[in-house]
Image (cartoon, helix red, strand yellow):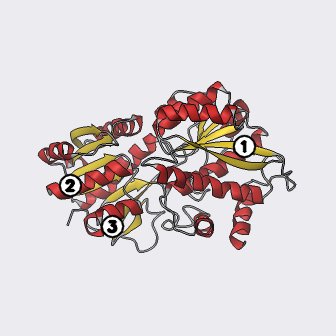
Amino acid sequence: MKTLKTMAGLALALGLGFASQVSAQQTLKIGAINPYSGPLALYGTEVTRGYELAVDQINAAGGVLGKKVELIRGDASNPQQGIATVEQLATKDKVDMFMGTYISGISLTASDAAMRYNKLYWETNAVSTALTERGLPNFIRSGPDGAAFATTSANVLRNLIAANLKKDIKDLKIWLESEDSIYGTGIVEAQKKLLTEMGAKIVGIGAHSARSIDLNDTVLRAKQAAPDVFVQTGYVPDGNLLLRTFRDQGFKPGAILFVGTGDTPETLEAIGPAYLEGVLVIGYPRSNDVTEAFGPGNRAFLAAYRAKYKSEPVAPQGMAAYSGTLIMFEAIKLAGSVDPEKVRAAAAKMDKPESTYPSGFGIKFDKNMQNVRAWFTASQWQSGKMVTVFPQNAALPGVTVKPLGRP
C-alpha cells in the first residue's frame, strides 16, 4: 500500500492528476503488442509488466480522461502476426489505441496496421530508426531509437574502451556484428558512420539471423580480422550463442561490447559469471543500479515491481516501458483524447529535461515524433552482476571499470 501511494504521488508530481471518480463501466482499452509466446516471450512479458505497473499507478490516481485503463495483450512473435493481432484487437476487442513493442520488425507492421483503423500506436521500446523515419501519422516513440544506441556505442568505445586498452580511438580495430533485421542492421549502419568519422578502423561487418543455431563461421571471420573490440547488436538467443562460440573457439578480443542485450539473468545462467566478467553492455538504465538523481523514481518502480511480481526485474526494458507509459498518459491528458492527431499535437509541445523519469528520460519530440531526450547507459559484468559504468552521473558512488579482456 505504501508503494502504491508513493507511485501515485509520483504521478501527481509528473502532472498526472486525473479525475478521482471513475465509473467501472468506463474503460480506456489499450492493446499491448508484444511476443507473449516463442523464444522472446520472457522479454515481451517484461515490457508489458512495465505497462502494467504504470496502469496500476494511473488507475490508483483516478484513471485517464475520467476512465479506468484496461490493458489487453496482443501476442505477436513475428511481423506478420503483428498485423493479424492488431486487426483482432481493433475489430473484436474494440481497443481504443495500441502500444508496444519488444521487437522492431513487429512494431513496423503492427503500427502500420493500426493506422488503417486510425488508432494511436505509442512505441516505448522498439528502437529501429526506420519506425519514425516513415513519418506515420499515428506513431510516437517515447524511448530512445537506434541512433541513440549507435551514439552511446561510439561514446563508450572512444571514452571508455579505448582508454582502458591504452589506445587512441583512431588506432582501435573494431568488428561490427548484428542480427539481420531492421533493428540490428540499422544500428550497425549508424555505428559505422559515427566510428568512421572518429577515425576508428572498422575491420569487418557481419550479420546473422537472430534464430541462428550455429555461429561458428561468424566467429571464424572475426578471429581472422583480429579486432581489438567485438561489437554485437542483437537479441538474447543469438547473443548467448555468440558468447558460447567465442568461448568454444578461444576467441579473445581485447573487449566485447554488446548492444541491446547481454545483461539478463538468462545470459548469466547460460554463460556463467567467469566468462562474462568484464563484458560491457549498452542497454536501458537498470532500476537497481542507477542513481536517483539520474532516474528519479527508479527505486519506487523497483519496489512496486517486487511487490506485484514477487521477483526481481528480468530485464531493464521494463522500467523503460514504465517511463514511456507515464509519458504517454501525460500526452493523452494534454490532448484530452486518444485521437492520433490530437495526441501528436499535444506531445509535440511537451518539454521536460533529461532525468525527469525513472529511466533518466526527459521529453522533447522531433518532427518525426521521436523523443530526443531518451538515452541508454553502459553496464559491465562484475562478479556475476551488472554494474552501471557510463555515463558518470548514472553510476553509483565508488564504481570503477574492471579489466575488459576474457579470462
Q: Which residue is mark 1?
A: 29
Q: Which residue is mark 3?
A: 401
Of the two numbered discs 1 and 3 in the rendering, the one whose residue sits closer to the viewer: 1
Query: Is residue 287 visible in this depiction of the protein?
Result: yes
Disc on the earlier residue, 1 or 3: 1
User: Which quadrant is the C terminus positioned in?
Assistant: bottom left
Q: Which residue is mark 2?
A: 246
Question: Residue at coordinates 70% horizontally, 38% vertically from top-left?
Answer: 93
Question: Residue at coordinates 31% horizontally, 54% vertically from top-left?
Answer: 240
- Quadrant location of residue 197? top left
Type of amino acid at the residue the image marks with label 1: Lys
Q: Secondary structure at mark 2?
A: helix
Depth check: give the residue in front, 64 or 28.
28
Percent position of residue 273, x then y: 30, 68
Percent position of residue 78, x then y: 46, 37
Badge 2: residue crowd in 10 Å (few <14, some 14–19, many ≥20): many
- Quadrant location of residue 119? top right
Q: CA distance from mark 3 to mark 2?
A: 22 Å
Of the two numbered discs 2 and 1 in the rendering, the one whose residue sits closer to the viewer: 1
Q: Secondary structure at mark 1?
A: strand
116 is higher (above) or lower (below) than 370: above
Percent position of residue 395, x then y: 45, 66
User: Which quadrant is the N terminus positioned in?
Assistant: bottom right
Type of amino acid at the residue the image marks with label 3: Val
- Quadrant location of residue 29? top right
Depth check: give the residue in front, 207 or 367.
207
Percent position of residue 144, x then y: 51, 45
Residue at the farthest top position: 116
Disc on the earlier residue, 2 or 1: 1
Q: Are marks 2 and 1 in contact (CB under 8 Å)?
A: no
Type of amino acid at the residue the image marks with label 2: Phe
